[in-house]
Image (cartoon, coloured by chain):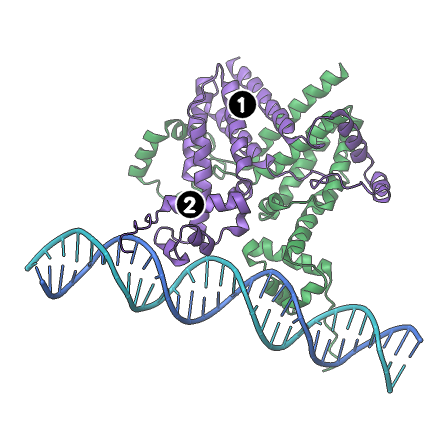
Chain colours: A purple, B green, C cyan, D blue
Amino acid sequence: MSDEHAKEPLTRARILDAAVRLADESGMRAVTMRAIGDELDREAMSLYHHVADKKALIAGMVDAVVAEVAEAGTAVHRANWRATVRERCLEARRIMLSHPWAPSVIAQQEESPASAFVLYNELVGTLLAAGFDHALAHRAIHALGSFVLGFSNELFDPAPGGDEEPDEAAMRAMAATFPHLLEMADMELHAAEGALSMCDTQAEFEFTLGLVLDGLEARRLELAG
Amino acid sequence: MSDEHAKEPLTRARILDAAVRLADESGMRAVTMRAIGDELDREAMSLYHHVADKKALIAGMVDAVVAEVAEAGTAVHRANWRATVRERCLEARRIMLSHPWAPSVIAQQEESPASAFVLYNELVGTLLAAGFDHALAHRAIHALGSFVLGFSNELFDPAPGGDEEPDEAAMRAMAATFPHLLEMADMELHAAEGALSMCDTQAEFEFTLGLVLDGLEARRLELAG
DNA sequence: ATGGTCGCCTTACGGTGTAAGGACACATCC
DNA sequence: GGATGTGTCCTTACACCGTAAGGCGACCAT
């Protein structure tokens, strides 16, 4: 019995990993000290030797996700700044979607995660190399960052549950109160036969991304004169 | 003693109001059933007669904020769609800033708050009247919405605490690791004598807003041919 | 009077973060 | 060897959280 290989020792990294996995699978509500302990076959209190408290643990989870975004992009070098940045934003979004809990948790952080510096440093480098000046690069990362974060948070996705018999009466009431919205829903549903929902969010994301990139390119050209 | 005017009766509206005030003043962590009860001079359990549970309460808080945004804009009618929409976005941002807890809580909602329909219906109306088609209007509200929400969540605001002696050694290390970032910080700090911080977020917000509006205008003109 | 409904309260339970301190293995020095 | 840390993990305990279950008085209709 004493010979059974000793349990792998606890580590900050292993703890954060377990926490992220828990959050991915069961949502942030499932991320409790005791649950993480169970996951690693330890008691909850043992975690406190590697993590200051739950706030620090969550900050660590955030940093892990941002680091993922940063690392995923180190190899991306496209023909021009636009393609490079576009690729990195799409990558960032993919990662955010694989950690659905992340955007709202990131929004609650009061300090920038350290990995954000890595990420933004690279991004600014790309932009400067393409002829952006510092002010424009600064604005670009704000625009892109806020938008990548904001887009996971859709405020408007009617009936995300699915198509449960629209309920004729309620529908008519809605049509009276929100005529433009219903019109739009009609049009879009008709147009998008193949899409998953009226809001095919990936398409929406890429549209807005294009919007922002176009705008930045125009400002860059103004600089170039 | 029996004559003391009876306590004002509890109401869903009064409860939501107290909850929002608590969140504004002390953050979302302070919003507990018992704290809301105290605020209204009742016991925690009394709230459950007007609110299903805490999830519903939070949904109510979100709806209240979105309704605030919707109502704040009903009177806005500027010369053109661009000015109108711009005004409404700025208003929305002002309101988000006055409820700092809101964006991250909104991001956690799984159902659209009812007031979002009111808000978006109006917005779509404005856009359609200006010559947008339904598809473009749809994309516009996604772009604007996600961006207004995302922008309150800044991932990148170095040293939000303030200017505590940058610490020469740490600074030098940073400069080695994040050269572009430090360069940028230098430039921006120098340029922005009057601003509150390197990231004068209001300016950043308006810049990005302009970017998005420009992009939408260009697409609209393509439609008009 | 009687029974019902409404608004509020009391009590109680399981789950949460974490403070305080104990148990035990191992390294280091005498 | 023994003594003495030192670092890792566990036990116990507590205050606070959301909320299930049920009680109690005020009102209102019959």
Crowd band around label 1 with a 10 angstrom C-alpha radius: few (<14), some (14–19), many (20+): some
Q: Earlier in the sequence, mark 1 or mark 2?
A: 2
Find disc 1 in the rendering and name its residue. Answer: A86
User: In the rendered structure, which amino acid carries the disc numbered 2?
Assistant: Leu
- Check the residue under mark 1 and report the chain it is in: A
Judge from the rendering whether residue B216 lies leftward or rightward of residue A42; answer left or right.
Answer: right
Q: Nearer the viewer, residue A69 or A85?
A: A69
The label shown at residue A16 is 2
Judge from the rendering whether residue A130 lies leftward or rightward of residue B50; answer left or right.
Answer: left
* Count of numbered circles in the view: 2
User: In the rendered structure, which amino acid carries the disc numbered 1?
Assistant: Arg
Q: Residue at x 39, y 55 (%)?
A: A42
User: In which quadrant is the N terminus of chain A drawn?
Assistant: bottom left
Whether residue A136 can be seen here: yes
Residue C9 x/y as whole percent: 66, 75
Relative to B110, residue B26 above or below:
below
Q: Nearer the viewer, residue B80 or A17?
A: A17
**Based on the displayed image, in which of its 4 quarters is residue B125 positioned?**
top right
**Based on the displayed image, in which of its 4 quarters is residue B182 positioned?**
top left
Crowd band around label 2 with a 10 angstrom C-alpha radius: few (<14), some (14–19), many (20+): many
Q: Nearer the viewer, residue B153 or B189?
A: B153
Relative to B170, residue A47 above or below:
below
Secondary structure category for the residue under label 2 = helix
Residue B31 x/y as whole percent: 59, 58
Residue B132 x/y as whole percent: 76, 24
Residue B78 x/y as whole percent: 75, 32
Q: Residue at x 62, y 35 (%)?
A: B146
Whether residue B79 can be seen here: no
Marks 1/2: CA–CA distance: 29 Å
